[in-house]
């Protein structure tokens, strides 16, 4: 369904990418398995973990779960692991750009911001 | 007492309705069950419609977002009024109108009277806030809110006001001793 984002894990590289549109009918059902996986990964992560968000849209229900994902990363950083968040926003979308800035202010992990042409 | 519309006047009604839609510049009008598929169908439809008239991408995504949040407020947060059939509580109306200045996204649905105070206070409060206060409230709700009916509805309203910069408009119309019709309008300026 094109209402749920694409999720790509590359465990060996410590890279996780979530992209596309996020407005699933049941936000918890979609994101809980990702959170569970991430919490497990956090127990023994790669030396560097890179989380890339490349949304074209997400609804307010998704925004909570995105914060939950970032919170796991923050905990990984507190545990002494290296983490990085890449926040992509469509070049015309100021709201998506601002969302990345807001998350970077709420969560204490390094953020990089990039525009892209979807 | 007005004459009831005779069967043969149905075509007249349809024409009057069509003219009304033109006069009020209504791009889309729907009454029925408001569920996930309906939400996706209408958001796709309006998105396509806006592409055809070459609206700016930034405006398209704003209107899209207001539609998603407004419709999800009904489909996810409508409560069962009890004496209505299980379909009726996610039933409502949905309108999108467009003139040369604004888009209006209008929803209407039946809710229990005991929800009025909560909704009234919530929306009045959201309307009273500055942009900075809205951003702070949004972040606070994001951190502390539960994924419950109450928390979810709040975040949607806050974000609609925050992203459009316009006051949320709403009205309650009594339909029975226990229920009201809750009408909600969000306005998006075409020139951002």
Image (tube, rainbow, N blue to C red):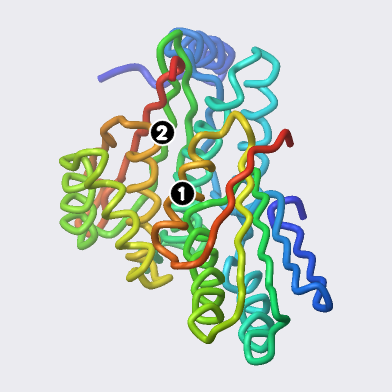
Q: Residue furthest bottom?
A: A43
Q: Secondary structure at mark 2?
A: strand
The answer to whether B64 appears left or right of A50 in the picture is left
**Mark 1 to mark 2 CA distance (whole Å):** 31 Å
Q: Nearer the viewer, mark 1 or mark 2?
A: 1
Q: Residue B2: x and y, percent? A: 30, 17
Residue B83 seen from this side: no
Residue at x 48%, y 17% (from the top left corner): B98
Q: Chain of mark 1?
A: A
Q: Residue A101: x and y, percent? A: 46, 49
Residue position marked by numbered label 2 in the rendering = B106
Q: Is residue B126 above or below residue A117?
A: below
Residue at x 16%, y 52% (from the top left corner): B121
Q: Quadrant of residue B43?
A: top right
The numbered dot on residue B23 is: none
The answer to whether A71 appears left or right of B141 in the picture is right
The numbered dot on residue A101 is: 1
Q: Residue A16: x and y, percent? A: 73, 67
Q: Is residue B161 above or below residue B17?
A: below
Q: Residue B71: x and y, percent? A: 49, 46
Q: Chain of mark 2?
A: B
Q: Quadrant of residue B192?
A: top left
Q: Secondary structure at mark 1?
A: helix
B158 or B93: which is nearer to us?
B158
Residue at x 53%, y 67% (from the top left corner): A65
Quadrant in which the N terminus of chain A appears: bottom right
Task: Classify 10 Å Cα crowding around label 2: few (below 14), some (14-19), many (20 and above).
Answer: many
Residue at x 63%, y 84% (from the top left corner): A36
């Amino acid at each position: 369904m094109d209402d749920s984002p694409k999720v790509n894990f590359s465990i060996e590289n410590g890279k996780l990418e979530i992209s596309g549109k996020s407005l699933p009918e049941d936000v918890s059902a979609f994101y809980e398995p990702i959170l569970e996986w991430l919490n497990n990964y956090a127990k023994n992560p790669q030396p560097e973990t890179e989380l890339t968000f490349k949304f074209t849209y997400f609804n307010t229900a998704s925004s909570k779960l995105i914060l939950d994902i970032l919170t796991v990363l923050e905990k990984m950083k507190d545990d002494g692991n290296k983490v990085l968040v890449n926040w992509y926003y469509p070049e015309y979308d100021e709201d998506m750009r601002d969302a990345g800035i807001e998350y970077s202010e709420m969560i204490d992990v390094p953020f990089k911001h990039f525009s892209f042409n979807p | 007492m007005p004459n009831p519309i005779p069967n043969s006047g149905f075509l007249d009604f349809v024409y009057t309705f069509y003219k009304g839609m033109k006069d009020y510049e209504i791009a889309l009008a729907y009454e029925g069950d408001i569920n996930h598929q309906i939400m996706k169908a209408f958001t796709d439809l309006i998105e396509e419609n806006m592409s055809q008239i070459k609206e700016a991408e930034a405006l398209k995504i704003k209107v899209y977002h207001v539609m998603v949040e407004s419709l999800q407020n009904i489909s996810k947060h409508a409560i069962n009024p009890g004496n209505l059939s299980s379909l009726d509580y996610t039933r409502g109306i949905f309108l999108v109108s467009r003139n040369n200045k604004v888009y209006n996204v209008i929803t209407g649905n039946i809710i229990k009277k005991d929800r009025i105070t909560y909704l009234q206070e919530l929306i009045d409060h959201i309307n009273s806030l500055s942009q900075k206060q809205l951003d702070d409230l949004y972040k606070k709700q994001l951190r502390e809110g539960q994924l419950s009916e109450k928390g979810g509805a709040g975040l949607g309203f806050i974000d609609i006001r925050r992203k459009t910069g316009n006051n949320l408009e709403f009205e309650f119309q009594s339909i029975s001793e226990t229920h009201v019709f809750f009408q909600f309008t969000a306005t998006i300026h075409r020139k951002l």
